[in-house]
Image (cartoon, rainbow, N blue to C red):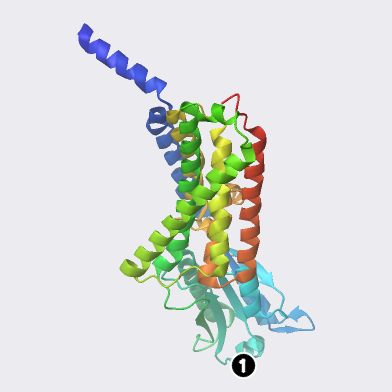
C-alpha cells in the first residue's frame, strides 16, 4: 500500500503542478457548465428582434387598424419591436443596418381591413431553414395574424390579413453558408491566440528572447514578425475551410474583397492578443491554459454557433465587447448578406483591436525579464 500510495501522491503532485492539466480538469468543465447553463437556462426570457415599418399613416399618425396590429406585436413577450420610420426605403434600410427580420404594413391596410378585403403584410427574413430565430418569429406572427383576424376584425370569413413571406438573402443559401463564416472566425481566433502564445512561450523557455536583447531587433519588429507569420497560417486555414466547404458541402459563399480585408484584420488582431497574453505566461502548460481561458468563452459567446438573440441580455452585453463577435458579424455581412457598410464597420473595429494589441505588446514586453 505504501508503494501504491506513493504513486497516487506523486501523480497528484504532478497534476497540481501542471497548469494545463488543472485547466482541463477543473476550469474547463466549470466554464462549460457556466456558459451553456447561462445560455439555455435563461434564453427563454430572451427577446427576438423584429423591425416593423408601418407605412399606413395619415399625417404622420398610424391608422386605427395598423396601430392595433402594432400594439398586438408589442404585447408579446417574445418579440423585441424596433419601429422603422414610414418614409424609410425598406430595402436600403435592411442592407445598411444588417436587419435580419422586418415586417412591413403597407399603405391601405386600414381601409382594406375595414372593408373586409384581403390585405397582405410583408415579412422579410433570413430563410427559416438556416435561422431558428426567424422560424420562431414567423410562428409568433402567424399566431398574431390569426388572433387579429378572428378577434379584432370580427370578419366572416376571418382571413382578412395574410402574410407574404420574402427572403432577405438568396434562397439558394443553406445552413452551411451561414455556419462557415463563424467557423472561419473561430479558426482565426484559436490559431492566432494559441500560435502566438505557444511561439512566444517556447522561445522564452529556450532563452531565445533574452538573447534578442543583444540584437538590433526591436520588440515591435518581433511582435509584427510573429503576427505576420500567424497571418499566413490563418490564411492557409481559411483556404482549407472554404475548399472543404465547396467540395464536400457545395458551399455557396466565398470571400470577396471586403471579407478578405476582414480576414486579414482578424488574422492580425488575435495573434496580437496572443502576444500580450504570452507576456504573463512563464511555461508551456500555463500557456495552453491561459489561451484556453481567453478563447473558450469567445468561441461560444460571439455567435459562432448560437445566435446572440437566444442569449440573455447580460451575455449579449459581454458579446458586444468581444473581438470575435465583430469578426463573425463582419464575415456574414460581407459573404452572406452583402451588407458592405456593416462589414466595413466591423473591419475597422477588428483592425483597431489588432493595432492596439500590437502596440500594447511592444510596450509591455521586456527582453531582460523574459
Q: Outermost residue toward the top? A: 2
Does residue 109 appear to the left or right of 198 in the view shown? right
- Residue 57 placement: quadrant: bottom right
The percent position of residue 189, horizontal first and vertical second, equals 50, 49
Q: Identify the residue at horizontal 25%, vertical 14% (top origin).
A: 7
The percent position of residue 338, horizontal first and vertical second, equals 56, 73
Residue 81 visible in the shown view = no
The percent position of residue 333, horizontal first and vertical second, equals 56, 67
Of 105 and 88, nearer the camera is 88
Crowd band around label 1 with a 10 angstrom C-alpha radius: few (<14), some (14–19), many (20+): few
Vertical comparison of 249 with 265: above or below:
below
Residue at mark 1: 115
In terms of secondary structure, where does tag 1 sit? helix
Q: Identify the residue at horizontal 40%, vertical 36% (top origin).
A: 29
Q: Outermost residue toward the right? A: 59
Does residue 69 appear to the left or right of 194 in the view shown? right
Of 165 and 214, nearer the camera is 214
Vertical comparison of 18 with 356: above or below:
above
- Residue 15 placement: quadrant: top left
Vertical comparison of 299 with 174: above or below:
above
Of 311 and 177, nearer the camera is 177
Vertical comparison of 290 with 6: above or below:
below
Q: Identify the residue at horizontal 50%, vertical 30% (top origin).
A: 208
Quadrant placement of the C terminus: top right
Of 360 and 297, nearer the camera is 360
- Residue 153 placement: quadrant: bottom right
Amino acid at each position: 500500500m505504501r508503494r501504491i500510495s506513493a504513486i497516487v501522491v506523486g501523480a497528484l503532485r504532478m497534476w497540481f503542478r501542471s497548469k494545463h492539466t488543472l485547466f482541463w480538469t477543473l476550469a474547463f468543465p466549470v466554464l462549460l457548465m457556466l456558459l451553456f447553463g447561462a445560455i439555455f437556462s435563461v434564453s427563454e426570457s430572451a427577446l427576438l428582434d423584429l423591425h416593423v415599418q408601418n407605412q399606413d399613416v395619415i399625417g404622420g399618425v398610424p391608422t386605427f387598424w395598423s396601430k392595433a396590429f402594432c400594439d398586438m406585436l408589442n404585447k408579446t413577450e417574445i418579440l423585441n419591436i424596433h419601429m422603422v420610420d414610414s418614409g424609410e426605403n425598406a430595402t436600403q434600410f435592411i442592407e445598411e443596418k444588417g436587419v435580419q427580420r422586418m415586417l412591413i404594413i403597407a399603405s391601405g391596410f386600414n381601409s382594406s381591413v375595414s372593408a373586409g378585403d384581403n390585405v397582405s403584410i410583408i415579412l422579410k427574413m433570413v430563410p427559416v431553414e438556416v435561422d431558428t430565430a426567424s422560424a420562431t418569429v414567423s410562428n409568433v406572427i402567424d399566431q398574431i395574424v390569426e388572433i387579429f383576424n378572428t378577434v379584432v376584425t370580427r370578419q366572416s370569413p376571418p382571413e382578412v390579413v395574410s402574410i407574404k413571406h420574402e427572403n432577405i438573402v438568396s434562397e439558394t443559401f443553406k445552413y452551411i453558408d451561414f455556419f462557415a463564416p463563424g467557423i472561419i472566425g473561430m479558426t482565426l481566433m484559436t490559431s492566432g491566440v494559441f500560435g502566438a502564445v505557444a511561439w512566444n512561450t517556447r522561445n522564452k523557455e529556450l532563452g531565445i528572447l533574452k538573447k534578442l536583447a543583444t540584437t538590433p531587433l526591436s520588440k515591435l519588429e518581433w511582435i509584427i514578425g510573429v503576427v505576420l507569420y500567424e497571418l499566413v497560417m490563418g490564411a492557409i486555414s481559411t483556404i482549407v475551410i472554404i475548399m472543404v466547404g465547396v467540395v464536400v458541402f457545395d458551399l455557396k459563399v466565398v470571400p470577396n474583397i471586403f471579407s478578405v480585408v476582414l480576414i486579414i484584420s482578424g488574422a492580425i488582431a488575435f495573434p496580437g492578443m496572443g502576444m500580450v497574453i504570452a507576456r504573463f505566461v512563464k511555461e508551456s502548460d500555463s500557456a495552453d491554459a491561459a489561451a484556453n481561458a481567453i478563447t473558450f468563452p469567445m468561441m461560444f459567446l460571439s455567435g459562432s454557433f448560437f445566435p446572440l438573440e437566444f442569449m440573455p441580455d447580460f451575455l449579449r452585453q459581454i458579446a458586444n465587447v468581444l473581438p470575435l463577435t465583430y469578426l463573425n458579424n463582419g464575415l456574414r455581412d460581407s459573404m452572406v448578406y452583402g451588407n458592405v457598410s456593416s462589414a466595413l464597420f466591423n473591419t475597422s473595429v477588428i483592425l483597431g483591436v489588432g493595432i492596439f494589441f500590437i502596440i500594447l505588446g511592444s510596450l509591455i514586453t521586456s527582453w531582460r525579464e523574459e
